[in-house]
Image (tube, rainbow, N blue to C red):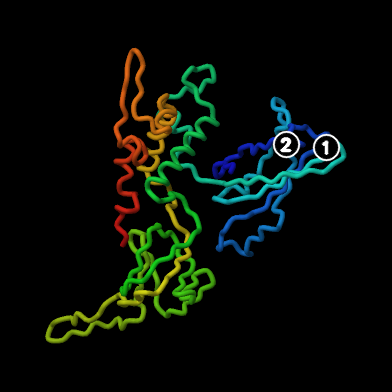
Amino acid sequence: MAEIYKNTSTAITNKLYVKGEPVTPSSSVSVKFYDITSDPLVNPAINPATILVTVTAEVSQTDEGSYNVYLPTSYLERNRSFKLVWEWVYDSVTYSDTTFLNIITPYVDIREAALELGFGSDSNDPNHKTNQELRLAERYARNTIESYTGQKFYLHDDYFSTIGNDSDTLPTTKKIYALHTLYSNDELLVDNINLINNLGLVIETTVSGFGIRVNNSATLDENVYVANGMVPPSVDDYSANIFRKYRLYKVYARFGWEYVPTQVKDATIEIMKMYFAKDLVWKNRYIKKIATTDWDFEYSSQAFMGTGSSYADKILTDYVITQMVLV
């Protein structure tokens, strides 16, 4: 699936084919954009069957059959998903092709990464990397980090299911930015979007974001009663045992980080450097040892674990989900 960075005007390219051959239609090529994002906060609700905008594509001057289209920047301000329907006429026959596009948050500014990696900005520089090469390297690093940590370090809507544990806290393996709805065995408890609270208690995110808990302080008597100079220990801000055992809870929320953590940015640059290393093609094939008449080297078994970079693994340790503190 194609992707472009949030808040950037980048060409979306597609090559048109008829009977397996690239063609250049004599008439214009129109592209219809449909918003297929799952975003419960948008009001009115997103209708994936509604055409968002229609844009005329620009023909490529160097590659037969290739067309570029630019989505207006007003649609690029947040992470989104689009369906694109390309329509054209060739030899009096109407054709169409459907592609998909994600608007994503990169884990590092590729210009910053190029500077730190010492890549030349001049195309004549032998150490120069094109914008496309840098984007592919960032994507490789981003996918590697997400696979290693089990986390996505940008805001996205998703849900999480878990079983209760007879406590006032419900841990999650995803970092919650904002709670949307909470269900217990398909029964709606809380709907923060429509301001519905069937539980009658305040649900809040834990300090780390890796869980939710019940805050019962709003229902308590704020007066402090003193007996024999002592404050009774019975006043508790939290309601115990709300999340019951053997009950399935579904948490719908906006998960992730509002800003990419510094450690993730640094790890992205490190893995991008590894991406451009000449031995990557061999390591990706799980080749343990390489030898020639002049030299030989053998990979450590750890080279095929984690991100493949010991430095990146080290700075990402606190973000690996199995090692993260949940509450």
Query: Camera-side residue: 39 or 195?
Result: 39
Q: Are marks 2 and 1 in contact (CB under 8 Å)?
A: yes
* In the displayed structure image, the side of residue 226 where residue 109 appears, left or right: right
Circle 2 SS class: loop
Residue drawn at x 34%, y 49% as measured from the top left? 319
Label 2, label 1: how far apart the Cα atoms are? 10 Å
When the figure is inspected, residue 72 is found, relative to residue 297, above or below; the finding is below
Residue 47, image x, y percentages: 66, 60
Residue 147, image x, y percentages: 41, 46
**Farthest residue toward the top?**
294
When the figure is inspected, residue 34 is found, relative to residue 144, above or below; the finding is below
What is the number of callouts on the image?
A: 2
**Farthest residue toward the right?**
92
Residue 126 appears in view: yes
The residue tagged 2 is: 16
Three-letter code for the amino acid on which mark 2 is drawn: Leu
**Farthest residue toward the left?**
228
When the figure is inspected, residue 46 is found, relative to residue 101, above or below; the finding is below
Residue drawn at x 37%, y 67% as measured from the top left? 212
Residue 115 appears in view: no
Residue drawn at x 72%, y 44% as measured from the top left? 97
The residue tagged 1 is: 90
Quadrant that contains the C terminus = bottom left
First in sequence: mark 2 vs mark 1: 2
Mark 1 Cα within 10 Å, few/some/many (few <14, many 20+)?
few
Query: Camera-side residue: 218 or 313?
Result: 313
Say which quarter of the image contains residue 237: bottom left
